[in-house]
Amino acid sequence: MASKKLLHDVEKLIASQLVEWPQAADNYKALAGVKVKTLDVDGMKVKVQFNPARIVSSSAKVDAKSLKERKCFLCEANRPAVQSGIEWCDYVVLINPFPIFPRHLTIPDRSHVDQLIKGRVADMMRLACELEGYTVFYNGPKCGASAPDHMHFQAGNSDFLTLADALKISSRNPIIVDRRGNLSALRGLPLNMFLISAIDFEYGQKLFDRLYDALPVPAGEAEPMMNLLCFKQGDTVNLAVIPRKRHRPSFYGTEGEGCMLLSPASVDMGGVFITPLEKDFKRMDADLVRKIYDELCLDLHDVADIVDRLKSKM
Ligand SMILES: [Zn+2]
């Protein structure tokens, strides 16, 4: 059985930081009043959140030059003195001062190393297991991470996302089946994804490595583009792997007809779109969600190619 210690310590951390850190407390208070609307996208429930405080993240410049010129906000030396954390393995668990979730954590590595997922999925599954009730997520360096130069996970209370319900309406095409865990391609959702379900996290890491090796790596990138969402369900940990082919929608921007300030990451893939501008919040509908998923995620041919590559190596 997973230890409940981390979960208990995290609840205490959130409570104390909201007392000690007025800026964070204000942002959490403001979050309680943000507007949310719900859409039905081909049977998947998708929420849209109007969250003006997230403009910093949605418009973040993540090119190499901009990163070099700013101080890394995930390094201990640059974090606000009032921000405290809980050490967990190589990581530290912090509260996110610009929340999307009512309980929102940022979990950086303790050293300043690039945002790369290789070798870290077992950690992610262990975290999700110890943080039952939270979804732990990873945004690839070109898939929504606003600090692609410093490895970090995030986590938020799972009941806020619609992913778990979406998994129930999906059908599974099993690729690797073992008593320690399974890898499937999911069908019937408005976005294409793979699912790893594991009771043995080292084996979950192995399944992920197989999938990772079968995913395309865009020119100039260090790893396949992806968002990952991981949560515990019963005795199993589920890891949704959402391969991406594009960083931001073709109509990303702040000016010009039809432009929208959307920088989709794991949370949007998990069923909650974040719009920092009210005009974009009003405009979002099921057709736009479909268009964004189509532009950013893999199509059925791409998925079939990956499944072929996985099977040819078995
Ligand atoms: Zn750093």
Image: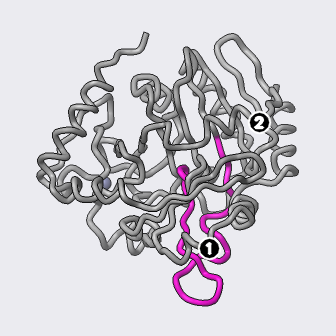
Task: Tell me the residue at 26%/52% (across/down).
Answer: 75
Residue at label 2?
A: 170
Q: Quadrant of the C terminus?
A: top right
Label 2: element kind: loop
Indicate the quadrant where residue 62 lies.
bottom left
Magenta-span inclusion, residue 16: no
Residue 274, image x and y in percent?
51, 61
Residue 51, image x and y in percent?
42, 64
Label 1 is placed on what type of residue?
Arg
Q: Nearer the viewer, residue 112 or 295?
A: 295
Residue 252, image x and y in percent?
59, 76
Label 2 is placed on what type of residue?
Ser
How would you rate the neighbour count of disc 1 (Cα within 10 Å): few for under 14, some for 14-19, many for 20 or more?
A: few
Between discs 1 and 2, the one toward the N terminus = 2
Ligand 1 lies in which image quarter? bottom left
Residue 35, compared with residue 96, is above or below; it is: below
Q: Specify start and end residues of the magenta stretch as a single range.
A: 241-267
Characterize the magenta stretch by its predominant secondary structure. loop
Residue at label 1?
A: 283
Q: Nearer the viewer, residue 264 or 227?
A: 264
How would you rate the neighbour count of disc 2 (Cα within 10 Å): few for under 14, some for 14-19, many for 20 or more?
A: some
Task: Tell me the residue at 59%/46% (across/down).
Answer: 270
- In whole angstroms, how far apart are the C-alphas of marks 1 and 2? 27 Å
Task: Tell me the residue at 57%/60% (across/down).
Answer: 264
Residue 7, image x and y in percent?
32, 26
